[in-house]
Amino acid sequence: MRRGQSTALAALVLAAWVAAAQAGEPAPNWKRVSAPSPGGCTFYVDQTSIATRDGHEEARFMSSCASVQPASSAGGAGYRSRAFLEYFDCAGRRSAIVRLDYYAGEYATGTVTESHDWSTPPRYEQDAPGSTAALWLAMVCRGLVGPAGPK
């Protein structure tokens, strides 16, 4: 693909993502992985983000809420959605959130109101059986979500 074609394709993908967010739906790469919580937040996984890198699996998740949520820390602003990158140690059955961004808009759009980076070094924690983290670990490590093709 030539440079002009790849730029046009990137612009088309970005336009589709923005149109989906404005229509009240996430971009097509986000797959819903939860029903709305009592607080009106729904979780999604970016199926295109699931990958094996440096001996761990990783995936990007997002929660999008029907209404503004309270700030996550003192001095922070309220948010409508948050996106986070999580590492998974499948053999050890543990995970680590390494990046967390809070957004003013739904579906990880709008102004970033707060951001955290815990990637150096990642702090892995055991995932309690039956927890949301354990469910996501199973989905990612067993290949229940993700891009088409063998794992």
Image: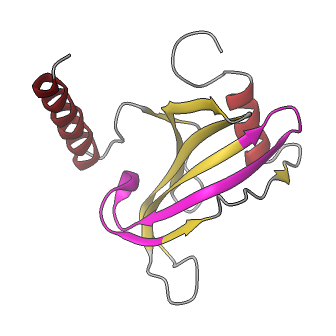
Give the number of callouts. Answer: 0
Residue 103: horizontal and vertical position, in percent?
Answer: 40, 64
Q: Is residue 68 magenta?
A: no
Q: Is residue 105 magenta?
A: yes
Q: Magenta part of the protein: which range? A: 88-114
Asked if 105 appears above or below 131 in the picture, the reply is: below
Q: Which residue is drawn at the image coordinates 73% and 28% (left, top)?
A: 141
State the image quarter where residue 27 is shown.
top left
Q: Is residue 56 left or right of residue 125?
A: left
Q: Is residue 95 left or right of residue 74?
A: right
Asked if 16 appears above or below 86 in the picture, the reply is: above
| Residue 63 visible within the image | yes
Q: Which residue is drawn at the image coordinates 55% and 45% (left, top)?
A: 61
Q: Which residue is drawn at the image coordinates 55% and 61% (left, top)?
A: 100
State the image quarter where residue 29 is shown.
top left
Residue 137: horizontal and vertical position, in percent?
Answer: 74, 37
Q: Which residue is drawn at the image coordinates 59% and 30% (left, top)?
A: 51
Look at the image and tell me in which quarter the C terminus lies.
top right
Most distant residue in the bottom direction: 75
Asked if 129 appears above or below 98 in the picture, the reply is: above
Residue 80: horizontal and vertical position, in percent?
Answer: 42, 64
Coloration of the structure image: secondary structure
Name the one closer to the observer, 117 or 73: 117
Look at the image and tell me in which quarter the N terminus lies.
top left
Name the one closer to the observer, 55 or 143: 55
| Residue 34 visible within the image | no
Name the one closer to the observer, 19 or 118: 118
